[in-house]
Amino acid sequence: MSSSDSYYIEILNNIPIYLHKYFATFLYIIGNIGNLLAISIFFKRSWRKNVCVFYFLVCLFANTIFINSTLLGSIFALGFNSTIQNSSVILCKLFYYISYLTSTYYPIILILASIDRLLISSQNIDTRLYSSKRMAYFSTSIATFIYSTFSLHILIKVNIQEMYPGVFICYYDLSESYLNFFTYTTAMQSVLIPFTLIILSATAFKNVRRIRAIPRQERRQLRSMNKKDFQLLRCLYIHNIIYITCTIVLSVGIVYATATRYETATPLQQAVNNFLNNFGSVLHYIPYCTNFITFVCVSKAFRLEVKRLIFKMIRKDLTIIREEENNQQEAVKDNIEQHHAISTIDVNA
């Protein structure tokens, strides 16, 4: 191995360390603070009655667990070279199980939320009936049970393995059959989940455009969606886009590693592969930590709730917030004839 290769290998090995030490730590802080603020806002009565908000709450709780388990463990392991999970079999199994479960649970809930928006944006009345809180409870419960059960192989197969003489590391079972099973299932998930989100988001967006094209006089049997509903729908689109974008590198790396796992790699090629996987992992953390930022940037109603919450925390007079709400209501009344409402079936029908 030449000196130039050693130089590049050292750089490629050091970059992920600094990314986890500083950038991932920054994500950890803003992720926890943002998720807690978003949860406190969505638990208000005016928000939690919305079906889409229920899915967002599930995502926020799951992401908070992910941040304080997977992300925190990765920061210590890769950023500070502290592997606590190697000291205990129980910690080892729990760390890998929670990491595996929560990392995939978030996109699964996004898929369920996208299906719900697809149903409610349908022009078929019977199809829209399936968008309900009851269906949301049922679907999330079934998804949680199925994936928690499927992930039990992690608790069974992950253990503290002797990778080298005298070197023990918490890792998956080294048998070829299990590694093949884990590798191929992970590769399939890395491809199918983003592809499913793309299809559902595109179809729901197409349905919304069709509903907008319906003449107003033909919507009598339908109930209108308010601005908050549209803002939540846009938030869901942005969440899907961020997740797909930030997981591309990791997904490509997993697929490439699966396709070339039996090929012999040079030290430089191995360093490049490790760098892409670690860099992809850092990007993969972003969707779990930026939910609050998305809500603030996309939803005016959410921004107003944040202002109200901040003013309440600092015990400031809420007159400014009330005046802003009154101004918005007056603006809506003045422009009511210029806006067209998108409608869905009446709940009480």
Image (cartoon, rainbow, N blue to C red):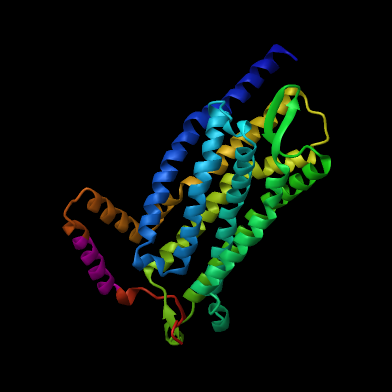
Residue 163: image quadrant is top right
Q: Which residues are magenta?
A: 322-335
Q: Residue at x 60, y 64 (%)?
A: 200
Q: Position of residue 241 (x, y in %)?
A: 54, 53
Q: Residue furthest top?
A: 3
Viewer-nearest residue: 254 or 156? 156
Position of 171 relative to 154 (above/below): above
Q: Residue at x 50, y 35 (%)?
A: 24
Viewer-nearest residue: 256 or 102? 102
Quadrant for the N terminus in the image:
top right
Viewer-nearest residue: 311 or 270? 311
Q: Is residue 2 among the parts visible in the rendering?
A: yes
Q: Position of residue 132 (x, y in %)?
A: 50, 74
Position of 54 relative to 102 (above/below): below
Q: Is residue 195 among the parts visible in the rendering?
A: no
Please give the count of numbered marks on the rendered protein. Answer: 0
Dominant secondary-structure state across the stretch colored magenta: helix
- Please say whether residue 334 is one of the residues in the magenta stretch: yes
Q: Position of residue 156 (x, y in %)?
A: 71, 46
- Please say whether residue 315 is one of the residues in the magenta stretch: no
- Left or right relative to 178: residue 211: left
Q: Residue at x 65, y 36 (%)?
A: 277
Q: Position of residue 95 (x, y in %)?
A: 60, 41
Residue 229: image quadrant is bottom left
Q: Residue at x 50, y 29 (%)?
A: 21
Position of 251 relative to 81 (above/below): below
Residue 340: image quadrant is bottom left
